[in-house]
Image (cartoon, rainbow, N blue to C red):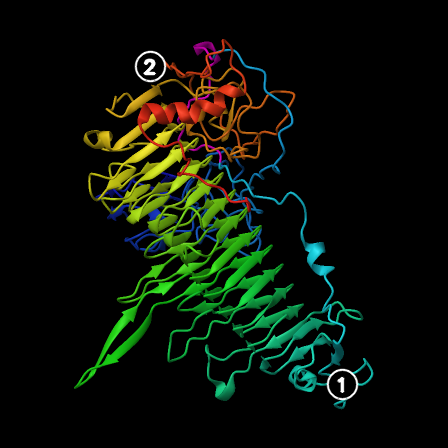
Amino acid sequence: MIQTTIASDEFSLSFGANPESLVLNSILFGEVEGGPNINYSWVRNWPSGKGNIVDEYDLALDRATFRPLTSASIVDAGTPTNIHTDLLNAPRPIDIPGIGQEMTGSEYDMGAFEAPVSGYPGIPVTPIKTPTKTRTPTPTFTQSNTPTCPPIVSYPATFTPIPSAPEPKQAQFRSKPANPKSNTITLYVDSSFSAQGDGKNRRNLFTSIQSAIDSAGKTPATIYIQPGTYQEDILIDGQEIQLIADTASQKRKSIVDGKVPNNRVRLDGYSIEIRGSTDVKLSGFDIFRGRVKSSKSSGMIEDTTIAYNNRMDFPPPLRGGGIEIGQSEFEIRNSTIKGNWASEGGGIYARYSNVTIQDCKIEENEVFPWLDRYETDWDYVYFWVDAFGGGIYALHSSLVVIDSEINGNRANAYEGGTGLGGGIWIYADPNRETRIINSDISGNSSWGEGSACSLISVHSDSFRMIHCILSGNTGAQAVHIGGGNPVFQSCFFEGNEGVFSLEASSKPTAANCILYRNIINHSPVFRVDGGNDSLKFINCSILENRSFRLREAIQFEYEIAPFEFVNTILWGNSPLIDPHLMDLLTFRDSIVDFDYQGSNFERVYREWPGFADYCGGDFHLAEGAFAIDKGNLAYLPDDVLIDAVGGPRVLGPSVDIGAVEFQSVEYNTPTFTPTFTRTPTSTPTITPTPTLTPTLPFDVVTDGRVDIHDPLLLPAEDALKSGTEATGSAFHFSSYW
């Protein structure tokens, strides 16, 4: 067995004493017994042989495709063989600079894939367009249109869109005047200046930032700081101060380096503290080993890096490893918050505040459980407290995140404490707005709940996640919902260890979302822990999601929690649910690839949907696809105007089934390009199965034609049939959207 990946740990491999057995350059997730001829391989529990990597923990592989990340220990760690291509026909070996033996011809990777130097490329999503044309109705899909590529393959292309804003936003912030007030004074600082001056010009400067702030007093001041290193803590107390890096003469940024008094590593020592102040601005700073704390203040942080504040000290907890915002209103723009540690909010902590984060990178921050105690009559009792929000922590706050990346953050577990919300942890307030728009939340991890985000008590009128990517989040389901009914629209979930976990009467809705190859070992794709929970999918594409350790992708703790799929495609999910629980699922106007006929099935089709290139990861509908116009407009919220990739949502007499609306040729919406192509090994024969005949009452007005008046009455028509009000309560978009 050479250059092979066995990606399931539910197997055992025993060689006995056979001297002809050989395992080389391979990855073995299961139990291995014996085997002196296992060499240059990644194994979990057997150290014999030469050049092996023994690790009982997880390996740095892409969880959806089992390809190595460039940082994986298996890269360039193999030995030469006579097999010179990998599973994708890429050449072997490929030398990754700085890893292994350089340019010796022995830089083979372990496993079935060889990592390219630049990593595996992602595929961008096209900007959102405003629909201007109407689609001409297409012919009915027939079996002759079935693609030759098998609809289910072992290694489909990785489909990783990256959101992009319709237009750049940086210029409008940088052109904003430093301070519009007429009584503002201007001061200058340079730490390298030979003598302390009055700071009124660049020839007579202050030598410290704090001396300039103190000189300003209560007068609004703009302080220009000469780039350099400043060894000082900064306090802005009840003032209107704007600290701006003076880059007029140099390109370097100013750096504030937090002090480490008495050689102690302090996590509760602040680099910049803002108390009771208004219109504060920090611009052009790099703050290392320090942080920013604001209380009862307002202001902006822009063009700033806050990184590597990773000191742990007592007494904990430390809130906000990078930024702590309490009872304040702050904007954070064009900034990087990286590599910080805390017990709550590794990157950013917000409590009873209004926070806007735009065009930012919040990455590689971590939270850790901490040891607390309480006193009894005779002793202290110690206990572990959970950690919350590796990237962002928001408690009773208004949080708006736009065009940002929240990647690689961790909520760790230790002893009796666990980590919740690897990327984001939110305890929502129904009176405060939470929006996460056009952002990438990927590669985060949690040892408790919500590897991407954990949402507690969120409500549809206060929480929206729109056009976001959640991929490669590990350790738990990507999104944990502990109460409320949040809405996810036009989001893409790929390669996560599960997608949703629900408890505490959660009722989320997902519309125009793609859920693709979320493959996990330890828990289901969808987990429902409460009897009053439910999950509704509208116009979604749920494809190739797998659960290996458990038998089903959907798991119910109590067998009374309903799922509802409307205008949705479910294909290649293996297996979906235990058949005796199928009656917990409701399907309406949807396409499925299984034969079970549930009691809650209405207009369910068992036909190939007609994707443009399913094997290549292109989930547009092809010309004449069966799914075109087969959906039911009665279930589509009125404010849903675009599909999952930015095209117009309805272009024909009805809505298409699935997340992506078929676009006519003249509209010319760009299609996804697969990362790699896989030559089909065979041509599948798809045998039609009996389907329910669709009966869509298009001519609701009964005037002998189908026109704009009919879809306007479809919601009311459907409500009359079901005995419910046509209020559209499942979705309601505010004027913000």
Task: Report the residue that reaches farthest toward the left.
Answer: 378
Residue 100 appears in the picture as rendered: no
Task: Report the residue that reaches farthest toward the bottom.
Answer: 195
| Secondary element type, mark 1 | loop
Q: How would you rate the neighbour count of disc 2 (Cα within 10 Å): few for under 14, some for 14-19, many for 20 or more?
A: few
Instruction: Estimate the x, y position of residue 84 in percent, counting from the top left.
Output: 50, 37
Task: Report the residue that reaches farthest toward the right.
Answer: 203
Please give the label number shown on residue 691.
2
Residue at 33% across / 14% down in the picture? Answer: 691
Quarter of the image where the C terminus is located = top right
User: Relative to 197, is 320 on the left or the right?
Assistant: left
Residue at 54% across / 63% down in the picture? Answer: 337
Instruction: Estimate the x, y position of residue 91 in percent, counting from the top left.
Output: 54, 37
Q: Does the segment drawn in magenta span residue 693?
A: no
Residue 650 vertical placement versus 67 (above, below) = above
Badge 1 amino acid: Phe
